[in-house]
Protein backbone atom coordinates (compact mmCIF):
# COMPACT_ATOMS: atom_id res chain seq x y z
CA UNK A 1 0.00 0.00 0.00
CA UNK A 2 2.77 2.42 0.93
CA UNK A 3 4.71 1.35 -2.14
CA UNK A 4 1.77 2.28 -4.41
CA UNK A 5 1.47 5.74 -2.86
CA UNK A 6 5.17 6.33 -3.35
CA UNK A 7 4.91 5.04 -6.92
CA UNK A 8 2.09 7.51 -7.66
CA UNK A 9 4.12 10.36 -6.18
CA UNK A 10 7.14 9.36 -8.24
CA UNK A 11 5.01 9.31 -11.40
CA UNK A 12 3.76 12.82 -10.63
CA UNK A 13 7.29 14.06 -10.00
CA UNK A 14 8.46 12.40 -13.21
CA UNK A 15 5.62 14.07 -15.14
CA UNK A 16 6.52 17.51 -13.75
CA UNK A 17 10.22 17.05 -14.56
CA UNK A 18 9.45 15.89 -18.11
CA UNK A 19 7.11 18.87 -18.59
CA UNK A 20 9.82 21.28 -17.45
CA UNK A 21 12.38 19.65 -19.73
CA UNK A 22 10.04 19.83 -22.73
CA UNK A 23 9.36 23.50 -21.99
CA UNK A 24 13.11 24.22 -21.73
CA UNK A 25 13.88 22.37 -24.97
CA UNK A 26 11.08 24.16 -26.82
CA UNK A 27 12.30 27.56 -25.60
CA UNK A 28 15.86 26.85 -26.71
CA UNK A 29 14.63 25.57 -30.08
CA UNK A 30 12.57 28.71 -30.64
CA UNK A 31 15.49 30.94 -29.65
CA UNK A 32 17.71 29.21 -32.21
CA UNK A 33 15.22 30.18 -34.91
CA UNK A 34 16.40 33.78 -34.46
CA UNK A 35 19.57 33.02 -36.41
CA UNK A 36 17.64 31.42 -39.27
CA UNK A 37 15.21 34.30 -39.80
CA UNK A 38 15.91 36.33 -42.90
CA UNK A 39 14.84 39.91 -43.30
CA UNK A 40 11.96 40.23 -45.73
CA UNK A 41 9.59 43.14 -45.85
CA UNK A 42 5.92 42.31 -46.09
CA UNK A 43 3.60 44.97 -47.41
CA UNK A 44 -0.09 45.08 -46.66
CA UNK A 45 -2.75 45.46 -49.30
CA UNK A 46 -5.78 47.62 -48.62
CA UNK A 47 -8.85 45.67 -47.52
CA UNK A 48 -11.71 45.05 -49.94
CA UNK A 49 -14.08 47.98 -49.81
CA UNK A 50 -11.44 50.39 -48.52
CA UNK A 51 -12.82 52.85 -45.97
CA UNK A 52 -16.45 52.07 -46.81
CA UNK A 53 -16.62 48.95 -44.64
CA UNK A 54 -16.29 49.10 -40.85
CA UNK A 55 -12.67 48.59 -39.87
CA UNK A 56 -11.41 49.55 -43.30
CA UNK A 57 -9.17 52.25 -41.89
CA UNK A 58 -7.39 49.91 -39.47
CA UNK A 59 -4.63 49.10 -41.96
CA UNK A 60 -3.60 52.64 -42.90
CA UNK A 61 0.10 51.75 -42.94
CA UNK A 62 2.31 50.11 -45.51
CA UNK A 63 3.93 47.42 -43.35
CA UNK A 64 2.62 44.88 -40.86
CA UNK A 65 4.82 46.20 -38.05
CA UNK A 66 3.25 49.67 -38.26
CA UNK A 67 -0.37 48.50 -38.36
CA UNK A 68 -2.61 49.01 -35.34
CA UNK A 69 -3.50 45.34 -35.01
CA UNK A 70 0.08 44.07 -34.91
CA UNK A 71 1.74 46.98 -33.14
CA UNK A 72 -0.81 47.69 -30.40
CA UNK A 73 -3.81 45.36 -30.19
CA UNK A 74 -2.20 41.90 -30.25
CA UNK A 75 0.62 42.79 -27.78
CA UNK A 76 -1.96 44.34 -25.44
CA UNK A 77 -4.19 41.24 -25.49
CA UNK A 78 -1.25 38.85 -25.04
CA UNK A 79 0.30 40.85 -22.21
CA UNK A 80 -2.87 41.17 -20.16
CA UNK A 81 -4.04 37.60 -20.78
CA UNK A 82 -0.68 36.29 -19.52
CA UNK A 83 -0.87 38.56 -16.48
CA UNK A 84 -4.41 37.35 -15.78
CA UNK A 85 -3.36 33.70 -16.10
CA UNK A 86 -0.41 34.20 -13.73
CA UNK A 87 -2.70 35.89 -11.22
CA UNK A 88 -5.26 33.09 -11.45
CA UNK A 89 -2.52 30.48 -10.98
CA UNK A 90 -1.27 32.21 -7.84
CA UNK A 91 -4.84 32.46 -6.51
CA UNK A 92 -5.32 28.72 -7.20
CA UNK A 93 -2.08 27.99 -5.31
CA UNK A 94 -3.32 30.00 -2.34
CA UNK A 95 -6.69 28.21 -2.40
CA UNK A 96 -4.94 24.83 -2.61
CA UNK A 97 -2.71 25.74 0.32
CA UNK A 98 -5.72 26.79 2.37
CA UNK A 99 -7.48 23.53 1.51
CA UNK A 100 -4.38 21.59 2.49
CA UNK A 101 -4.09 23.39 5.85
CA UNK A 102 -7.76 22.91 6.69
CA UNK A 103 -7.92 19.22 5.71
CA UNK A 104 -7.34 18.12 9.35
CA UNK A 105 -6.50 14.54 8.44
CA UNK A 106 -9.43 14.05 6.09
CA UNK A 107 -7.93 12.02 3.24
CA UNK A 108 -10.48 13.22 0.65
CA UNK A 109 -9.83 16.91 1.35
CA UNK A 110 -6.10 16.23 1.41
CA UNK A 111 -6.20 14.67 -2.08
CA UNK A 112 -8.35 17.52 -3.44
CA UNK A 113 -5.88 20.06 -2.05
CA UNK A 114 -2.95 18.22 -3.63
CA UNK A 115 -4.75 18.14 -6.98
CA UNK A 116 -5.47 21.86 -6.77
CA UNK A 117 -1.85 22.67 -5.98
CA UNK A 118 -0.55 20.32 -8.69
CA UNK A 119 -2.82 21.76 -11.37
CA UNK A 120 -2.01 25.32 -10.30
CA UNK A 121 1.74 24.64 -10.57
CA UNK A 122 1.30 22.97 -13.98
CA UNK A 123 -0.78 25.94 -15.14
CA UNK A 124 1.84 28.36 -13.85
CA UNK A 125 4.58 26.47 -15.72
CA UNK A 126 2.53 26.54 -18.93
CA UNK A 127 1.84 30.26 -18.57
CA UNK A 128 5.49 31.08 -17.87
CA UNK A 129 6.53 28.98 -20.87
CA UNK A 130 4.01 30.83 -23.04
CA UNK A 131 5.33 34.12 -21.68
CA UNK A 132 8.89 33.08 -22.62
CA UNK A 133 7.83 32.05 -26.11
CA UNK A 134 5.98 35.34 -26.62
CA UNK A 135 9.03 37.31 -25.45
CA UNK A 136 11.28 35.38 -27.83
CA UNK A 137 8.95 35.87 -30.76
CA UNK A 138 8.42 39.57 -30.10
CA UNK A 139 12.18 40.12 -29.79
CA UNK A 140 12.72 38.86 -33.35
CA UNK A 141 13.51 41.69 -35.73
CA UNK A 142 11.18 41.09 -38.67
CA UNK A 143 11.44 43.80 -41.29
Image: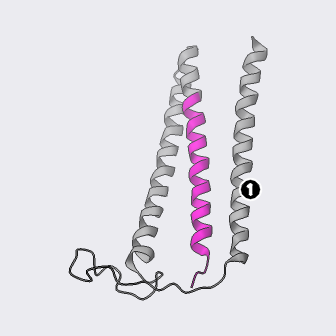
Residue 49: name its quadrant: bottom left
Q: Is residue 135 left or right of residue 49?
A: right
Q: Is 91 rendered above or below residue 109? A: below
Given residues 52 and 10, the one toward you in this image is 52
Given residues 106 and 47, the one toward you in this image is 47
- Residue 131 colored in magenta in the image: yes
Does dot 1 land on a helix, a strand or a loop? helix
Question: Going by the picture, which residue comes out furthest to the bottom?
Answer: 62
- Residue 90 colored in magenta in the image: no
Given residues 129 and 32, the one toward you in this image is 32
* Image spot of residue 17 (x, y percent): 74, 42
Q: Is residue 87 left or right of residue 122?
A: left
Q: Which residue range is magenta in the image?
A: 115-143
Given residues 49 and 54, the one toward you in this image is 49
* Image spot of residue 66 (x, y percent): 44, 84
Determine the residue positioned at 76% across, 29% down: 10
Amino acid sequence: MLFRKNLKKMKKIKFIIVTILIAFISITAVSSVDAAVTSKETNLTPPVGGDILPGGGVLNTDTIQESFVFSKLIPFVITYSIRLAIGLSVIALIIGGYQYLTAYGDEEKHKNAQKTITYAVIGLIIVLTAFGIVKIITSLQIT
